[in-house]
Image (spheres, helix red, strand yellow):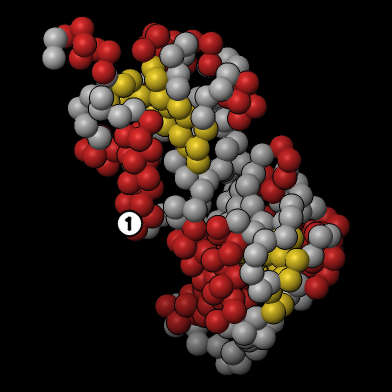
Amino acid sequence: MNTQLADRAAVDVLQLGGWLASELAEALPPRFRLLPAWQQPDPFAYAAAHGADVRAILTHSRCLPVDDRLLPVLPRLELVLNLSAGAEAVDAEALAARGIPFLTGSGANAVDVAELAFGMLLAISRDLLRGDRQVRQEQWPGLTPVVGRVAGRRLGIVGMGAIGKEIARRAQAFDMHVAYYARRPVAGDWRFVGDLLQLAREADFLVLALPGGPATRHLVDAAILDALGPEGYLVNVARGSVVDEKALIAALQQGRIAGAALDVFEHEPQVPAALRETDRVLLLPHRGGVTRDAFRDVAKLTVDRLLAHFPAS
């Protein structure tokens, strides 16, 4: 193949985040040229400088939003892949208006996020972290705090996509009573509740597993937390924006809910001191899908999608 034909066969891929960068570089054929905008001091200027040849975007972060500012400098763009399940950094409507396919990694790490969600549920309800600290500090309690069992309790899941379904399956193994709130009913043995406020009233544990973005911002507010009540727990493995963080802090301080387990926060990586300083909250650094297995599956899915859209001949 001469140089001119080789240039036409090449596929320039703009990377807007560093997640799985080395894995993708190793797995993709040499004709895919990965352009690391996330490493540049001015990602937009870098994208504009290389934009004439960019045919695909890989993203997972807010390094550079895929929107009406970026799209005009990428005239050959054919495909946008979001490695994660969310889409906050992508203007899907702007892509649709240009006929550019947009795919997310939804489902690729569903098992991993569900495992963490259920682990968090167990840890916060059984007060596991405080017990661990007491033993390490040689402060064996004279009277061990009495907590409730998880088996047989009522679980409300907000969002019944791939992650929500995996959480529900694990809950059934604990003989929990599972109900859920979503845009529409889904197939399964779980009870659909079309009113989030009603679901919160009925739940001992309210687990959030839905996308972020403007449509779900502060969906869980003071009214939902009050409905969950002083014996209820909130578990969030969705996006921090889904919860009104100020309302959550007030509910915790005033004892209007029993506790919370949070893997995501409204203004990551900043976490309010009021959350960091209470034993009634379990805090994790947005690690729901962070397993070797999930990384392997997401990388394979991304490579497969690129190869399918840009065949070698």
Image point (25%, 24%), residue name: 313
Visible residue check, residue 171: yes
Outermost residue on the bottom side: it is 142
- Quarter of the image for the N terminus: give it: top left
Front residue of 17/182: it is 182
Q: Is residue 177 above or below residue 66?
A: below
Front residue of 235/268: it is 235
Residue placed under numbered mark 1 in the picture: 292
Outermost residue on the left side: it is 1
Outermost residue on the front side: it is 313
Badge 1 amino acid = Arg
Q: Position of residue 309 (x, y in %)?
A: 38, 31
Image point (59%, 89%), residue name: 144
Q: Is residue 306 above or below residue 153?
A: above
* Left or right: residue 9 compared with residue 65: left
Mark 1 closeness class: few <14, some 14–19, many ≥20 residues within 10 Å? few
Q: Quadrant of residue 174?
A: bottom right
Q: Position of residue 243 (x, y in %)?
A: 71, 51
Q: Quadrant of residue 307?
A: top left
* Left or right: residue 40 compared with residue 26: right
Q: Is residue 60 above or below residue 45?
A: below
Image point (34%, 41%), residue name: 304
Where disc 1 sits, the SS reads helix
* Left or right: residue 22 compared with residue 50: left
Q: Position of residue 298 (x, y in %)?
A: 38, 47
Visible residue check, residue 262: no
Image point (75%, 66%), residue name: 192
Front residue of 250/63: it is 63
Q: Position of residue 301 (x, y in %)?
A: 37, 45
